[in-house]
Amino acid sequence: MIEIDGSAGGGQLLRTALSLSLCTGTGFTMTKIRAKRSKPGLMRQHLTAVNAAAKIGNAFVEGAELGATTLRFEPGVVTPGDYRFATGSAGSAMLVLQTVLPPLWQCDRPSTLRLEGGTHNPMAPSADFLVETFLPAVAKIGIEASLRIERPGFFPAGGGIAHAVVQPAQALRHAEFLDRGERRGMSATAMLSGLPNNIGERELDVLMRRLHLPREARRVHEVTPSSGPGNVLLLRVEHDSHAELFTGHGERGVTAERVAERLCEEAGHYLRSTACVGEHLSDQLLLPMALAGGGAFTTHLISDHLSSNARLIEKFLPVEIDWTELAPQLWQVRIAS
């Protein structure tokens, strides 16, 4: 039984602990869950992840309730199958998927999942990010999974539906993401649900001006309204060896121009570096690489998420995760057993 101080990070620590507990058969107790957040304890999306992990892993759980700051999790045998998980709100269904993905790919049969809730949430990977960036990256490690968005669910209303298929991973392999190669191009999509098209046009105008995005590489995409209006701005940056997707979220009281400016600022840090992997993918690669026993990547920033996730992974698995600064805005992260 591993003891974990949850105040060292947010919900990501809990999700990583749940995944690794099921993968290794090691139980854990986490205290001070999200203690430094404005609303400490388990929120609905965290609770859904706990219940999803318990269901696929036949686990014994104590403390699985909204607002709980202590959780005890004792895993059983992970069972592949057909599952449906709903956050019951705009909470991120994609974070639930990332929690159950590692134990399910270790099974001997495929699994299918119906995920309901938020598909495009601030502070969480969007469904498009998983499709465009995360899943192609982990495929190089030997993980085969697919994700289809039936209906997007935007913050704050949610109401999205997505379907995932997870195949057994026969053998994971070491992978390296060190050089992204020459840039192939950039493209952008403004997704709108129940809002005027000119909001998307204004966002894309900012990207065209700030990033010199060609007019033919931009589009406005109207989607079937989910539970409420929503707006997401997607920027795809493609290089020879890797593609990153950056996501901006429309908010009440925030202008379309400001949404696009924020996205340009985030993408600009990556574009000004020579790193292969962006900030958000960097901490998400640690777990599959650690389960594979090794790997390496370059990134432009060592985030708090990355460092806290690395230290937690080392509690469950016999690996060491280290990073070295090679140049300004260029770090190499290496996982070794």
Image: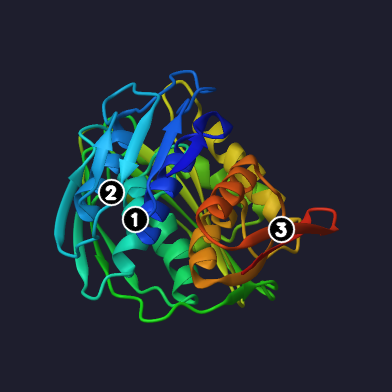
- Which quadrant would the C terminus be assigned to in this image? bottom right
Task: Judge by depth and name the residue closer to the eye, 247 or 139.
Answer: 139
Give the mark toward the camera: 1 or 2: 1
SS state under label 2: helix
Q: Is residue 80 above or below residue 94?
A: below
Q: Can you see residue 287?
A: yes
In the figure, 325 relative to 225: above or below?
below
Q: Which residue is mark 1?
A: 22
Instruction: Give percent across and percent down for residue 254.
Output: 49, 25
Q: What separation in Å lies between label 3 and label 2 (alpha carbons)?
A: 28 Å
Q: Residues within 10 Å of mark 2 (few under 14, many from 20)?
A: many
* Residue placed under numbered mark 2 in the picture: 53
* Secondary element type, mark 3: strand
Q: How is the image coloured?
A: rainbow
Q: Nearer the viewer, residue 328 or 16?
A: 16
**Precedes in sequence: disc 1 or disc 2:** 1
Q: Is residue 206 left or right of residue 161?
A: right
Q: Residue at x 61, y 38 (%)?
A: 261
Classed neighbour count for the residue bearing mark 1: other residues with Cα under 10 Å, few (<14), some (14–19), many (≥20)? many
> Picture coordinates of residue 77 (x, y %)?
23, 59
Q: Can you tell which quarter of the image residue 239 is in?
A: bottom right
Residue identifier under label 3: 322
Query: Looking at the image, do the residues carrying marks 1 and 2 touch, with CB atoms under 8 Å apart?
Result: yes
